Image (tube, rainbow, N blue to C red):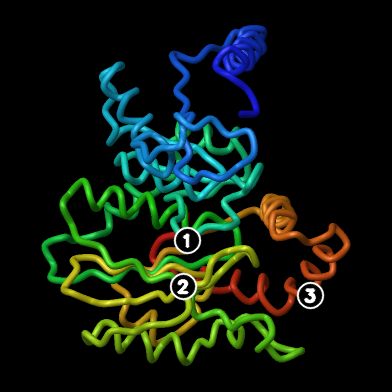
């Protein structure tokens, strides 16, 4: 009841006019006017229905795919909410979340990729850097083996998760089953950390070693999933090895453990320039709600107890990207 179809049309016209000023255009605009829950002041009764177009249902994406003959498996959905990620995944497209807007903060269903903003999401799609790096990793993978363990380490915000996701997608194209183990899930909650600790303590490195060994022996391991934002919805993460062809161990400390290195067939270190890392960390902690002063204090502390320590892990890598 906040507007009507004419009002919505005026909004769309203004958006298209502004895009046109920059010589950009959209092929079509889809919208869902429905809402399943009633009882709101000024609501329009005929729109109070269960529909197939309201996100996270994929109806609007499917309509567009049919009209424009779109290959959804080669398409991307960029959004800032769990409903965007859910709709994209339901439609079978690659989903990219952004830190702007709602920032995918209150979410359990997550996008495949997570970027700082819309331009970075576009760069991810058009640049193909992640895909190219994944193919470099694939050059070192023998899918004839019964099982291949790939460890991806490197400093925070260096692009490990992006690489791991791109690698998953390359493996899926070859019908190879994948078990991805996110080592962030072993991070101690902030309230359980001691005052003077380093990255290995925060990640509970001995527990990672024991749990990964258990997982690869066929034992299910359950733990509370890591929540990078305080608004995220807590959930239990279960890791089960069921003879997947490739196991990806991804996390800052993936190359820090001698035991993890020993079971890894391929060890990858994701490199990053220190200035670029700091700019990415600043954006990330701004998304988490840190002030610039709080970030600088944290960054200074972690230089010694995390970033410099992890940088030394490059010597253990079979492949540096």
Q: Position of residue 51 (x, y in %)?
A: 36, 37
Disc 2/disc 1 C-alpha distance (Å)? 8 Å
Local packing at callout 2 (Cα closer than 10 Å; few below 14, some 14-19, many 20+) is: few
Looking at the rendered structure, the secondary structure element under dot 2 is: loop
Kindly identify the residue that appears in the image at 56 percent across and 43 percent down: 80
Q: Position of residue 231 (x, y in %)?
A: 63, 63
Residue 301, numbered circle: 3
Query: Disc 2 designates what residue?
Result: 235
Kindly identify the residue that appears in the image at 43 percent across and 53 percent down: 163
Query: Disc 1 designates what residue?
Result: 108
Do callouts 3 and 2 mark residues in contact (Cβ within 8 Å)? no
Q: Position of residue 283 (x, y in %)?
A: 71, 51
Kindly identify the residue that appears in the image at 67 percent across and 81 percent down: 190
Q: Is residue 108 left or right of residue 244?
A: right
- 309 or 125, nearer to the observer: 125
Local packing at callout 3 (Cα closer than 10 Å; few below 14, some 14-19, many 20+) is: some
Local packing at callout 1 (Cα closer than 10 Å; few below 14, some 14-19, many 20+) is: some
First reached walking from the N terminus: tag 3 or tag 2: 2
Do callouts 2 and 1 mark residues in contact (Cβ within 8 Å)? yes
Q: Is residue 11 left or right of residue 282?
A: left
Q: Is residue 5 above or below residue 99?
A: above
First reached walking from the N terminus: tag 1 or tag 3: 1
Q: Is residue 93 left or right of residue 182?
A: left
């Amino acid at each position: 009841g906040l507007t009507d179809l004419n009002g919505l049309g005026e909004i769309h016209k203004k958006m298209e006019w502004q895009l046109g000023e920059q010589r950009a255009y959209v092929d079509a605009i889809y919208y869902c006017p429905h809402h399943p829950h009633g009882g709101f002041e000024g609501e329009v009764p005929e729109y109070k229905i269960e529909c197939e177009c309201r996100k996270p249902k994929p109806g609007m994406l499917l309509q567009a795919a049919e009209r424009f003959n779109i290959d959804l498996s080669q398409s991307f959905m960029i959004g800032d909410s769990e409903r965007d990620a859910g709709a994209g995944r339901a439609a079978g497209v690659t989903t990219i979340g952004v830190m702007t807007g709602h920032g995918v903060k209150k979410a359990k269903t997550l996008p495949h990729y997570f970027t700082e903003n819309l331009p970075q999401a576009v760069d991810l799609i058009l640049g193909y850097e992640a895909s190219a790096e994944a193919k470099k990793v694939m050059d070192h993978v023998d899918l004839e083996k019964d099982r291949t363990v790939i460890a991806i380490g490197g400093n925070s915000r260096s692009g490990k998760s992006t690489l791991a996701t791109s690698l998953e997608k390359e493996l899926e194209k070859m019908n190879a089953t994948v078990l991805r183990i996110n080592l962030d899930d072993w991070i101690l909650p902030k309230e359980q950390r001691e005052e003077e600790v380093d990255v290995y303590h925060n990640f509970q490195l001995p527990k990672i070693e024991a749990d990964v060994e258990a997982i690869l022996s066929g034992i299910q391991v359950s733990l509370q999933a890591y929540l990078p934002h305080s608004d995220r919805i807590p959930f239990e993460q279960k890791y089960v090895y069921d003879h997947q062809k490739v196991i990806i161990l991804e996390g800052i400390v993936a190359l820090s453990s001698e035991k993890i290195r020993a079971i890894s067939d391929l060890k990858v270190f994701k490199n990053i320039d220190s200035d670029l890392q700091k700019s990415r960390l600043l954006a990330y902690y701004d998304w988490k709600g840190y002030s610039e002063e709080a970030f600088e204090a944290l960054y200074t502390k972690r230089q010694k107890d995390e970033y410099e320590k992890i940088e030394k892990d490059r010597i253990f890598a079979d492949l540096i990207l």
